[in-house]
Amino acid sequence: MHAQATLPAPARALERFILDGIVPARDMQLRILEHHGGMLAMGAPLAANVNDKGCAFGGSLTSLMTIAGWALVELMLRAHGQDCDVFVADSQVRYLKPVWEDLRAEARLDPEADAGAFLDTLATRGKARIQVACRVLTGEGVAATLEARFVAIARKGDAHAAQ
Amino acid sequence: MHAQATLPAPARALERFILDGIVPARDMQLRILEHHGGMLAMGAPLAANVNDKGCAFGGSLTSLMTIAGWALVELMLRAHGQDCDVFVADSQVRYLKPVWEDLRAEARLDPEADAGAFLDTLATRGKARIQVACRVLTGEGVAATLEARFVAIARKGDAHAAQ
């Protein structure tokens, strides 16, 4: 389904963390497929995510996109030495067409998102939000999109870090 | 976790259909808890839906609310003798607070939704949309909300039924 041989070590470590810690991610058999150039791709086999119609369950598409976005933010923070809890705050999902193949979701920062401002705010206030854009891709094009806002809260460091 | 003894037979049959046909629903251990007065409640144990922080995985909250909404529409259609495929078209989700207990989601038609018009449109055009409002409830109040639009497409009946 995918070639993980070139997956960078931090992404491989995060995949391990996800599969060890998030029971539904393990059930869905999620995998991080790629992480480079500001894009994170995540996959899952159709068989573990199939609905009564034989295509992918909508909830699995949303879960895959949400966790791909979460992983993108988490890896960006780790790359900057930030130890944070990252939560999804809200999302808008559009289901465009059924998915009859193994699932692939790609996450990128929203074109309007400012990663520098996000990291600055996190450093000064211990909490910051950032917008992520995800989509499920098939051989026939985009099958679903998700726009989500994630909140990062510093685990320690200053008085602002507590929620 | 729940008292299904009084669950109406159509809801019990739909639960069976869901658990037989939707692999992730089975993994999440979804159950229909109640269905009466235009409200459908669905539950799932925290243990099967837990994340790395020990609370419910956001994707599971969304899946639970989405499938509760889907089940509400499906049961309404079955009650009116309509044989349809029902799909989620889009949704907006807000995650308000973490869930540290077994999951419970409630689905109702949106206050603005017109069930009569929905059924009329379905009868004349073979396809209709309706808006559903769902929320995850905990002992401490509402933990997440989902507003979703579902599309029903008649399986047979007239020339308009084909997508």
Image: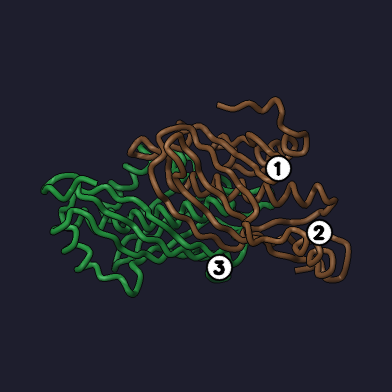
Chain colours: A green, B brown
Q: Secondary structure at mark 3?
A: loop
Disc 3 residue type (three-letter): Gly
Q: Are marks 1 and 3 in contact (CB under 8 Å)?
A: no
As measured in the structure, the alpha-carbon distance from the residue carrying label 1 to the one carrying label 3 is: 43 Å
In the rendered structure, find residue B10 and report the number of the disc placed on it. none
Pointer 2 or 1: first along the chain:
1
Callouts 2 and 1 in the same chain: yes
Task: Chain letter for mark 2, please.
Answer: B
The mark lying in front, picked from 2 and 1, is 1
The location of residue A96, given as percent across then percent down, is 58, 67
The tag on residue B37 is 1
Residue A130: x and y in percent read 30, 63
**To which residue does mark 3 refer?**
A139
**Going 15% across and 53% down the picture, which residue do you hit?**
A81
SS for callout 1: loop
Left or right, residue B55 beside residue A81? right
Quadrant including the C terminus of chain B: bottom right
User: Which residue was labeled with disc 2?
Assistant: B155
